[in-house]
Image (cartoon, rainbow, N blue to C red):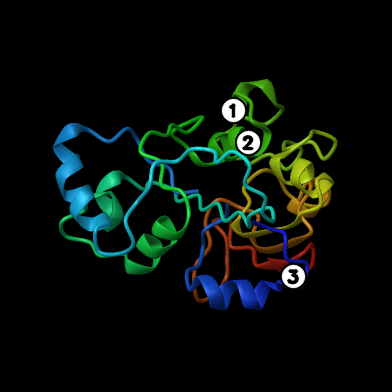
Amino acid sequence: MTSYDPNLSRRAFGGAVGVTAAAAAVGLGAASPAHAAPAAEARHSGPEEREFRAERGRRSRRPNILFILGDDLGWADLSSYGSPDIKTPNLDRLARQGVRFTDAYSGSATCSPTRFSLYTGRYPGRTKGGLAEPIADKSAGLEPTHPTLASLLRGSGYSTALIGKWHCGHLPDYSPTKSGWDEFFGNFGGALEYYSKLGLGGEYDLYEGDAE
């Protein structure tokens, strides 16, 4: 999640969004014609959706950017994309107020490579650790010196935060705060038990910044 508001805290973010575990975009495959009709019906529950295009001569503040990456999320999991059985009103509202893409492809079908690709804008295999799944060797990860989506946005004046799953390397060498994010609250590993906050290896894995 990236925000131009320097006063937005982690707790304020969590309360405003009302969802957990999302680290950084709703990854959806291409919508097929068979799904177009129900998707259109779902979108008509709020303000009319407009075509995404630049408006010449418009001057406005830079937008806040909320990017939600959901593992194993498909088109049939969101009502704004035509799901007939699952209702997601809060995410639908975000889609109506922002930009809803109908064609998107992730850099991989698994956790870590997808995140390497999202954060760097490169094929996962172009970066060290990008093809590891899962990252079990703590010597592998996203190099802090590599430019990332967060570091480039921060260089343009944005405040940046990552909430949820990082899965691109472990401390002490790798972390979101070393790769461009001002704030981090979440887990370093691939999965986290909700109640105990223990990772797959039985280790405690809930951090704020680089501290447990």
Residue closer to the observer: 151 or 199: 151
Residue type, mark 3 in image: Glu
Residue type, mark 2 in image: Phe
Percent position (x, y) of residue 97?
A: 45, 60
Percent position (x, y) of residue 29?
A: 34, 35
Location of residue 51 with respect to 159 vertically, above or below: above
Return the disc, 3 or 1, that comes first in the chain's sequence: 1
Question: Which residue has dot 1 on it?
Answer: 131
Residue closer to the observer: 63 or 23: 63
Dot in front, 2 or 1? 2
Question: Which residue has dot 2 on it?
Answer: 116
Q: CA distance from mark 3 to mark 1?
A: 27 Å
| Residue 30: mark in rendering | none
Q: CA distance from mark 2 to mark 1?
A: 9 Å
Q: Is residue 21 left or right of residue 160?
A: left
Q: Is residue 5 left or right of residue 63?
A: right
Quadrant into which the C terminus falls: bottom right
Q: CA distance from mark 2 to mark 3?
A: 24 Å
Residue closer to the observer: 117 or 6: 6
Question: Which residue has dot 3 on it?
Answer: 212
Residue type, mark 1 in image: Leu
Return the disc, 2 or 3, that comes first in the chain's sequence: 2
